[in-house]
Amino acid sequence: MSYDEQNITINEVNESLSLYIKSIDDMSGKLSFAEFFLDKMLIVQAIRKGLPYKIFNQIKSLTPFSDADWAEYLDLSLKSLQRYRDDKDFYFKPIHTEKIFELAEVTNFGMEVFGSSEKFYGWLNAHSYALNGYKPGELLKDSYGKEMVMAELNRIEHGIFA
């Protein structure tokens, strides 16, 4: 994805997310994708409401994950994801919304740390000595694995390499 395409997609996500957040909390102002992850209470409220497929689809376009990856991460069949796409009023259940936000948070932080989606995606798919030889992307199915990936990204951001 080119820099311009990525900016257009991020702007679309920012706009949709702001409207969605406004429906949850009237007091919230316009939030960016990155700012959303700083307000944990707002995240909890959004998880409980569920996420519309339209916003999921926009978030999905920012991530390195295929439809098959998303189906695996969300513990859904690929057929179910396709069916949800065709239902314009579909909202994900809270359990799935939480996982979507977790993966979006990792993507947001990873792109911030590496400065480009290509470098971040390359890191996700490379074996990591610090993660016991696992590829970071392999650990994202579980919340504990996600936390390990976030901790490793934090160490990289601060120049601490394994």
Image (spheres, grey):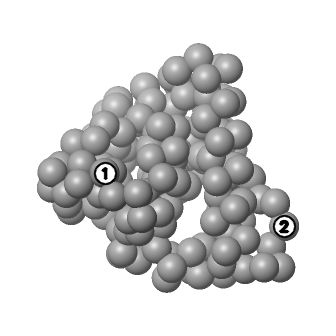
Give the structural element (helix, strand or loop) at label 2: loop
Mark 1 and mark 2 lie on one chain; the one further toward the N terminus is 2
Residue 158: % across, % down: 69, 44
Q: Which mark is residue 127?
A: none
**Observer-nearest residue: 122 or 32?**
32
Numbered tag placed on residue 86 in the rendering: 1
**Which residue is labeled 2 in the image?**
29
**In this picture, is 93 found above or below 104?**
below
The residue positioned 52% from the left and 21% from the top of the image is 1
Horizontal side, residue 16 vs residue 97: left or right: right
Number of residues whose C-alpha sits closer than 10 Å to that of mark 1, classed few (under 14), some (14–19) or many (20 or more): few
Q: Position of residue 108 (x, y in %)?
A: 60, 46
Residue 28 visible somewhere in the drawing: yes
Residue 95: give x, y in percent of width and height.
Answer: 36, 75
Q: Quadrant of residue 10?
A: top right
Q: With 154 as the anchor, is 150 left or right in this view?
A: left
Name the amino acid, label 2.
Gly
Between disc 1 and disc 2, the foreground one is: 1
Residue at x-position 31% and y-position 37%: 66
| Contact flag, marks 1 and 2 (Cβ < 8 Å) | no
